[in-house]
Structure formats: C-alpha cells, structure tokens
C-alpha cells in the first residue's frame, strides 16, 4: 500500500491535531481568565477607594463583586487545567467534566453575590446613609462601566468560540456587573439633581436580577452534568456522514456521551445488505469510525449492524406491509433493523416512539398487536428504541 494510503488508514494524524487543538483551547481559556483577573483586581481597587470616599454602599458592594469575579476567573483556570489531565485507569474518558463543575462553582458565586448584595441593600433601605458624590468618583465609575461592558463581551465571545461554559458564565456576570455600576451612576445623578437617594432601592432590584441570573446559570450547568439529550445538529451531521458511505443503507440509534466540552464518544447502528462479507463489514466500520472522528471529533466506540434482506422478494414485500402497519400509528417516528427468517417463521425489527406520545408503552403494544394479527404464524421480536436526538 502506498504511503498516502497508509496515512489515510492511520487515525493518529487526526488525534495529534485534536491534541494540539485541545492545548490551544486551554491556553486561550487561561489567557482570557488572566485578563479577567487583572481587570477585576484593578476595578475592585478603584471602586473600593471611591465607595469609601463617597460613603456609597452600592459602589463598595460593586468592588466586592469585582473581587468575586477575579475569584471566578481563577476557578476557571484551575478547572481548565484539571480538565486537561490525561485519561488514566480510574477515569479512562478523561477529566473534561471538571469544566462543568467549575462553571457550577462560578454560578454559585454569582448567586451568593446577588443574595449578599440584596441583604446589604435592604439594610441600607432600613438605615439609609447620605452619599457624598464628586466628579472624580463618578468619572471612575463611568470608566468602570465601559471596561466591564468590553470585558464581558470579550470573555463571553471567547467562551462561545472555544465552547467554555465557565468563560460564558464569567462574561455574563461581567455584563451584569456593568449594569450594577451603571445603576450607581443613575442613582448619583438622581441624588445630585433631586437630592433623593435611591441607590439602595436600585441595588435591591439589581440584586434580584443577579440572583435570577445565578439560578439560571446553575440550572443549566446542573442539567449538563446530569446529561442532556444529543445535540440535534451534531446528531444529524454524524448520521449524514455515516450514510454518505455507499454500503450504508441507514443509520439509527445514535447515542452520544459527553465527557466535557468537545469531548464526545458514542455508538450507532447501521443497515447493510445481507450480501456484505465479514471482511467488507470490518473495513466499512473502521472507515466510518475514522471519518466520523475526522469530521466531528466524535469517537464511535461501537457500531452495531442491521442486515437488510435482498435475496427474497416475498421478504421484501412483507417488509413493506409491516412498515405500512407500523407507520399507521401516530407517534411512531422510525422503523429499522427489519429482518425475516422464513424457515423459522421469525420476524424482528425496531421502532422509535416519540416522547410526545401520552403513553409510549401503549403505542408500542398496539404496534406489536397489529403486526401480530397480520402475521399470526410469525414470532415477533420488536424492540422499542429511543431517538436521543429527538427535537
């Protein structure tokens, strides 16, 4: 075999490329987090000085919030480094899910900051103190607003690009912080013009917004840790790649397991003609695994096989009749894996019943019953499958 052909058969180049991409992603996350730490430490220092000078509880709490943001960025760095550890005997699929844990910790920090701010704002409402704003302090706060807006957009943008929930959460938190800082300017303007102090009330309202955001972040992160359904776009793309092979007549039962951002493995069933030899099937499966990894960075750890009858016209006609019966039932989304053994009077196939069905088991039972009535002399082996990418 020629050298180019050998390179095509060897998945190592793609693996090495993926490794380089993982290292680049890790460096990007760490660099972005360091920028966030530096920016937040400087902002916290300036705001603390301004808050103490002007006797503004809102600005002091804003400074504390910046310190928590710096801590969040530090957690992101630690989580990213730990998630990048090589797989070992205890964790053969790697440590990628640690990133979800770091994102959850950041969500808790945001939630805690919101609750703390709300408590302090309520205390200020009950026991108000008159602020003492000056031009320099307001200019510093205005600059802080602009910096936070830019920082939030930058961090979230990088987070979306490298698929890092920790960065995305940090970016959203920075955007919320800019709203808090802007509210202090609004409160200052109202106080200077109308001599009415509303900063405590504004702080309470904004604290509730932060609490809501923290709860949503936490909910989304926990949902990922528990395990969400397959990404429909990724599932469609993988099936398209698999069915692009001429010998594959259908692709079903795709199951994807997520072990961290951009770390997927899974399994799939393919339909092939019953004339396919073991050697041809072995080569086909290897080619599918390499192509899916190359295009989608997903490792197919298992590829099951359904055999399609091609040698008996009566069997083919029977399959058509069975399909008509199966799809006459609402909520049936797929039928696949059909095979019939005439001399044993045995028939097998799988059906997929939608999650929208009021009772999936009842639909399955009706399908089996109707097919059995149409073919009373056959023993049936019908499996109810799940479409894990169902929208």
Image (tube, grey):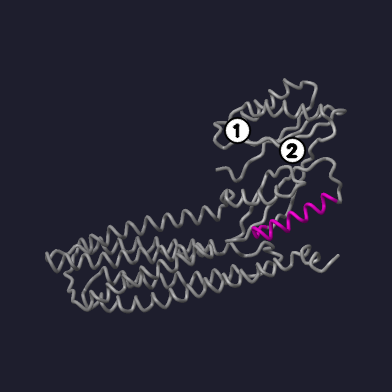
Label number found at residue 130? none
Residue 187 as seen in the image, left or right of residue 220: left
Name above or below for residue 276 compared with residue 207: above
Name above or below for residue 26 compared with residue 165: below
Residue 323: percent from the left, percent from the top? 69, 29
Quarter of the image holding residue 84? bottom right
Residue 353 as seen in the image, left or right of residue 89: left
**Residue at 86% over, 29% down:** 344
User: 225 or 268, which lies in front?
Assistant: 268
Residue 304: percent from the left, percent from the top? 75, 46
Residue 341: percent from the left, percent from the top? 84, 31
**Residue at 44% over, 61% down:** 107
Asked if the magenta segment contains residue 297, the reply would be yes
Asked if the magenta segment contains residue 289, the reply would be yes
Dominant SS of magenta comes to helix
Residue 209 as seen in the image, left or right of residue 28: left
For the N terminus, the quadrant is: bottom right
Residue 240: percent from the left, percent from the top? 66, 49
Disc 1 is placed on an element classified as helix
The Cα atoms of the two marked residues, 2 and 1, are separated by 20 Å
Q: Which comes sooner in the sequence, label 2 or label 1? A: 2
For the C terminus, the quadrant is: top right
User: 139 or 73, which lies in front?
Assistant: 139
User: 272 or 358, which lies in front?
Assistant: 272
Would you name the residue on which mark 1 appears?
360
Would you name the residue on which mark 2 appears?
337
**Residue at 44% over, 66% down:** 170
Magenta segment, which residues?
A: 280-298
Name above or below for residue 386 compared with residue 80: above
Tell me if mark 1 has few (under 14), some (14-19) or many (20+) residues whose alpha carbon lies within 10 angstroms of its own.
some
Disc 2 is placed on an element classified as strand
Tell me if mark 2 has few (under 14), some (14-19) or many (20+) residues whose alpha carbon lies within 10 angstroms of its own.
many
């Amino acid at each position: 075999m020629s050298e180019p052909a050998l390179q095509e058969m060897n998945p190592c180049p793609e693996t090495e490329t993926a490794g380089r991409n993982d290292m680049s992603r890790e460096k990007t996350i760490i660099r972005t987090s360091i920028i966030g730490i530096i920016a937040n430490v400087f902002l916290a220092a300036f705001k603390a000085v301004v808050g103490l000078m002007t006797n503004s509880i809102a600005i002091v709490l804003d400074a504390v919030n910046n310190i928590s943001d710096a801590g969040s960025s530090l957690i992101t760095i630690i989580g990213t480094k730990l998630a990048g550890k090589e797989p070992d005997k205890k964790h053969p699929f790697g440590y990628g899910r640690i990133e979800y844990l770091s994102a959850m910790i950041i969500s808790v920090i945001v939630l805690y900051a919101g609750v703390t701010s709300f408590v302090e704002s309520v205390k200020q409402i009950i026991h108000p103190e008159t602020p003492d704003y000056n031009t320099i302090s307001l200019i510093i706060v205005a600059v802080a607003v602009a910096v936070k807006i830019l920082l939030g957009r930058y961090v979230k943008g990088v987070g979306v690009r490298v698929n890092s929930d920790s960065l995305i959460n940090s970016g959203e938190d920075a955007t919320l912080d800019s709203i808090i800082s802007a509210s202090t300017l609004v409160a200052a303007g109202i106080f200077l013009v109308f001599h009415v102090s509303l900063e405590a009330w504004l702080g309470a309202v904004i604290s509730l917004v932060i609490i809501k955001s923290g709860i949503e972040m936490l909910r989304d992160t926990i949902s990922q840790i528990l395990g969400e359904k397959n990404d429909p776009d990724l599932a469609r793309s993988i099936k398209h790649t698999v069915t692009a092979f001429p010998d594959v007549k259908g692709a079903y039962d795709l199951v994807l397991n997520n072990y961290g951002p951009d770390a997927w493995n899974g399994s799939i069933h393919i339909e092939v003609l019953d004339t396919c030899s073991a050697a041809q099937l072995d080569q086909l499966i290897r080619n599918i695994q390499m192509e899916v990894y190359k295009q989608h960075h997903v490792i197919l750890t298992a590829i099951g096989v359904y055999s399609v009858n091609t040698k008996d016209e009566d069997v083919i006609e029977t399959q058509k009749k069975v399909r008509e019966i199966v799809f006459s039932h609402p909520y049936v989304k797929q039928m696949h894996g059909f095979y019939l053994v005439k001399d044993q009077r045995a028939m097998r196939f799988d059906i997929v019943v939608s999650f929208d069905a009021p009772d999936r088991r009842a639909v399955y039972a009706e399908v089996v019953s109707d097919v059995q009535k149409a073919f009373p002399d056959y023993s049936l082996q019908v499996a109810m499958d799940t479409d894990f990418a169902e929208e």
